[in-house]
Image (cartoon, helix red, strand yellow):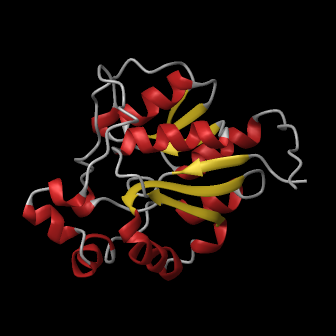
Amino acid sequence: MGLPEMTVDMDGVLCRPILGMNLVISRDVQRAPDVHRTRQLSELPSPLQWLDSKVGQGLRYGWRLPMPQVTEGLAKLAEVRRLVLLTGRPESARKATERWLIRHHLRDYFSEILLNDRGLSNAAFKLLKTRERGVMDHVDDDGRVAYFLAQDAPRTVFLIAWPKNHGLPYPPTVVRVQSLLEAAERIHQRPPSPVIETP
């Protein structure tokens, strides 16, 4: 027997953005994610290729602080969901991501960590992974991701409220929340989900 699976994004959900300004949120809900177009690191401009190095990843990810109420939110979610970290960060950032989670005592809340090993856009990668795994609950900060994940299936997407993801024509199953703890509280208010048998 096992709990239903829930996916949780990393940046802007668990990890604070650089300088507290979440500038990378996409509002482009007119363009569906292309789940077939991959991009190689060599296609990126040289400065972005440097960011993908170990030193670049350490500088990009290592010093950032957790979002407010993250520990409390994960603890409450873990009572009713099997948590899987689902991030658009590249697979090459696995060590930096794991180190950050361990440093902030968050790693043990997650049964798996799924990084973008397919070279897809953030939205396309998350769309494919939630489809493949039959995930019915997801937490994100990106408006475009929330829009297309909720449109794709009858899943609930808890969208951490940032100024840049406000005011889009979201499907009704996108729920904007102030924190991960609020998402957990809303899930606790639902009727219990059916228990899933695991082999």
Q: Residue at x 75, y 37 (%)?
A: 189
**Could one spot residue 177 in this view of the protein?**
no
Q: Which quadrant does the C terminus fall into?
A: bottom right
Q: How many marks?
A: 0
**Horizontal arrangement in the rendering, residue 66 relative to residue 40 (left or right):** right
Q: Position of residue 170 (x, y in %)?
A: 44, 21
Q: Residue at x 43, y 67 (%)?
A: 66
Q: Position of residue 65 (x, y in %)?
A: 38, 70
Q: In terms of depth relative to the viewer, which is nearer, 186 or 40? A: 40
Q: Residue 25 falls in which quadrant of the image?
A: top left
Q: Residue furthest left?
A: 46
**Horizontal arrangement in the rendering, residue 47 relative to residue 51 (left or right):** left
Where 191 sits versus 188, above or below? Answer: above
Q: Position of residue 18 (x, y in %)?
A: 24, 62
Q: Residue at x 77, y 51 (%)?
A: 80
Q: In terms of depth relative to the viewer, which is nearer, 157 or 93? A: 93
Where 6 sits versus 110, above or below? Answer: above
Q: Position of residue 31 (x, y in %)?
A: 30, 23
Q: Residue at x 34, y 52 (%)?
A: 119
**Could one spot residue 144 in this view of the protein?**
yes
